[in-house]
Image (spheres, rainbow, N blue to C red):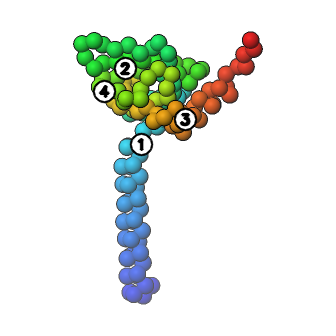
């Protein structure tokens, strides 16, 4: 191999290695910052990881909201009409948060199966539903056995 060709091969090799390392580092950084969405059925089935930042969404169950009178702590239950997840949150809830409304919460699932929310987002009007919550509700409704009355 002549020296000029060898020099080009070395340069191209270093470029490929450099680009590969850069892409690998970027992918590693991005994967650690991803919050996966789980619906209450997936959480109840054990598909959601414990002590890892995730998002859980669904509808707030009527009558499930309980507030601590001494602090900003609030507990409520989220459902996809198939399964329920208990959520605990300390902080100021969004103005649009109320029972029967769709929410998406970011936080961690503890060992007891209670979702410890760090952030709660509520839908912004009566017609809007976060896309992942709508898909989860539709999926749960399709999976639920048909009921006749």
Instruction: State the separation of the CA atoms marked 2 and 1.
Output: 22 Å
Relative side of 121 to 68, left or right: right
Q: Is 122 above or below relative to 88?
A: below
Q: CA distance from mark 4 to mark 1?
A: 24 Å
Marks 2/3: CA–CA distance: 26 Å
Labels 2, 1: front one = 2
Q: Residue at x 37, y 43 (%)?
A: 33
Asked if the residue at tag 1 contacts the one at tag 3, i.e. Cβ–Cβ closer than 8 Å, the answer is: no
Q: Give SS at disc 1.
A: loop
Q: Secondary structure at mark 2?
A: strand
Can the viewer see residue 115 in this picture?
yes
Q: Which of the labelled discs sits on residue 88, or is there none?
A: 2
Packing grade of label 4 (10 A; few <14, some 14-19, many >=20) is few
Q: Quadrant of residue 131?
A: top right
- Which residue is identified by label 4? 92
**Pointer 2 with pointer 3, Cβ within 8 A:** no
Q: Position of residue 80 (x, y in %)?
A: 56, 24
In front: mark 3 or mark 1?
A: 3
């Amino acid at each position: 191999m002549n020296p000029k060709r060898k020099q080009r091969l070395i340069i191209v090799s270093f470029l490929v290695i450099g680009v590969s390392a850069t892409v690998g580092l970027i992918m590693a950084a991005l994967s650690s910052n991803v919050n996966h969405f789980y619906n209450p059925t997936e959480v109840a089935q054990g598909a959601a990881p414990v002590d890892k930042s995730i998002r859980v969404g669904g509808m707030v169950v009527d009558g499930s909201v309980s507030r601590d009178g001494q602090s900003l702590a609030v507990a409520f239950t989220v459902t996809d009409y198939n399964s329920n997840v208990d959520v605990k949150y300390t902080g100021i809830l969004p103005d649009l948060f109320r029972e029967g409304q769709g929410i998406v919460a970011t936080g961690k699932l503890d060992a007891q199966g209670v979702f410890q929310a760090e952030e709660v987002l509520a839908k912004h009007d009566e017609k809007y539903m976060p896309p992942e919550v709508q898909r989860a509700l539709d999926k749960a409704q399709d999976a639920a056995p048909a009921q006749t009355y």
